[in-house]
Image: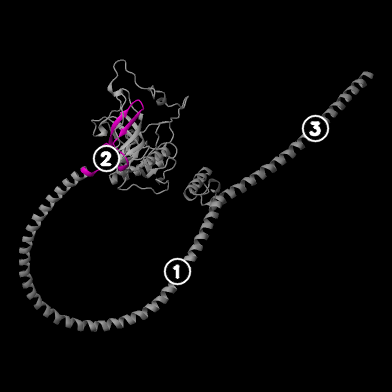
Amino acid sequence: MAREHQGLQIALIIFVMLTLVLGVTTFIFFRRYDETAIKLVAESQKATQAQTTVGNLQAEKVKLLKFLGFQESDKIDTVEEECRKDFTTYGSTFPEEQRTYRQLLKLFHEQIIKVNELLEAEKTQVQTLKNINERRDEEVKSQIDTANAARDKAGRDLDEERRKFADAHKEFTNREEALRTDLENARKEKEAALAQLQKQLDAATKQIQTLANLNAEKSKKLEDLVKETFEVPDGQISWVNQRQRTVWINLGWADGLQRQTTFAVYDADIYDVSKGGKKGSIEVTEIWGDHLAEARILEDRPTNPIMPGDKVHTPLWTPGERRRFALTGDIDLDEDGKSDLQKLLSFITLQGGIVDCYLDDKSPAILTGEGKPGGKMNLNTRALVVGKAPEGAGGKERLDAYSRMLSEARRLGIQEVPLKQFLSQMGWRETSPVMTYGPGANPAHFRPKPQEGLRPVSGGKVSELFQERRPPAPKPSGG
């Protein structure tokens, strides 16, 4: 009995435990069910809201497509491509950031407003012009009426004049017939006279042509006879004293010779100095008579000493005349790269020459002999001394001036003489050269030269060339 009760208790305990477990399980299940149901309701609400949003967006899309002029079925890619085509067609002139429909409409609207304003202004101007034309029409109408009245009067006057003209024309025709007959007779006589005159004219033309050819030939011969050149010697050596390095020449006061005039010396058998080489140079130190002067030897060669009878010449002076010159180009006498223009100007003036004009060594200005702007050559200018063509800084403007001077000299027929030839012919000799040492040295300064002031020494019999000579006695000025 006791065991039955014990089994019942155990069963009751198990039952109670199972009931508790089932209750707890049921509670947990229903709790989770409620939570799931709440979540399902929330998700259902979200889905409904999303569906509503999608429906609204779809409706807005359809509305926007219709607003833009597209079909409801058009894809977004199609709409985008068409928009790009519209922007390319209608908004290609606008910046990229302004290519939107609203911005384009705004810009188009602003342009339309401006066009309308211009149109209104044009309309106002047209109306103004129309009013002016109406006023002018009224004025012209009055003038037309006056003109019509004058025209009618002129018509009547014209009829009267036509009648008079017909009468005059008839009379003129009769006179014309008579004049035509007289004119025909006169024409025949004139043709005969013209034929005779043509024969005389042909003969005269032939004679004139012959005389013109003869005159040209004579003019050329005359020009050859009177044309000044640099080739004719000015005088000759009368006596030489090699020991004292002194010579006497046949030029003096009567020839207008001045002291310090330099001459180039040529051999005695030279009559065209351009065809012979210079053998030395001299400088006048004293003038003793009308045709006698003493000079010192500046330059000569021991192998070809200066002899009596040798010719002397300078382009700066001629007996009884002051020669005129022009200078152009870069003047560098000693080839040291520096301008010697002022030295040459002073030398020419010292020798009695006149400088009409020269090219400035620092600017393209063409100066007079006094250094003033505006110098020009003329028919009295004997020669144009041509130095090296300008170059370096500012050389282009000076080169243009250099070319202009050459052209002007050729136009005037002025002789062009290179600087080296000019220096040689006037007996130039650099007396105080400036020697530069180092990288900028002039090689010409270091060439071997014979010692100056030393008398040549002969190893045998002394030639008569080195015998002491005395100058001829001065001739009386009145003799």
- Figure label count: 3
Going by the numbered disc 2, the residue's amino acid type is Thr
Q: Which residue is mark 1?
A: 126
> Quadrant of the image for the C terminus?
top left
Q: Position of residue 280 (x, y in %)?
A: 32, 29
Q: Nearer the viewer, residue 147 or 431?
A: 431
Q: Nearer the viewer, residue 421 or 449?
A: 449
**Mark 2–mark 1 distance (CA, rounded to whole Å):** 83 Å
The residue depicted at 8 percent of the width and 72 percent of the height is 180
> Quadrant of the image for the N terminus?
top right
Crowd around label 2: few <14 · some 14–19 · many ≥20 (10 Å): few
Q: Nearer the viewer, residue 259 or 35?
A: 259
Q: Of tags 2 and 3, which is closer to the observer?
A: 2
Q: Position of residue 255 (x, y in %)?
A: 30, 42
Among the two numbered marks 3 and 1 on one chain, the one whose residue lies closer to the N terminus: 3
Going by the numbered disc 3, the residue's amino acid type is Ile
284 part of magenta stretch = no
Q: Position of residue 166 (x, y in %)?
A: 15, 81
251 part of magenta stretch = yes
Residue 275 found in image quarter: top left
Crowd around label 1: few <14 · some 14–19 · many ≥20 (10 Å): few
Determine if residue 132 is in view. Answer: yes
Going by the numbered disc 1, the residue's amino acid type is Val
Q: Position of residue 171 (x, y in %)?
A: 11, 80
Give the answer, above or below, for where 471 lies relative to 48: above
Residue 229 numbered mark, or none = 2
Image position of 470 (left or right of 167): right
**Mark 3–mark 1 distance (CA, rounded to whole Å):** 96 Å
The residue segment tinted magenta is 225-254
Residue 394 numbered mark, or none = none
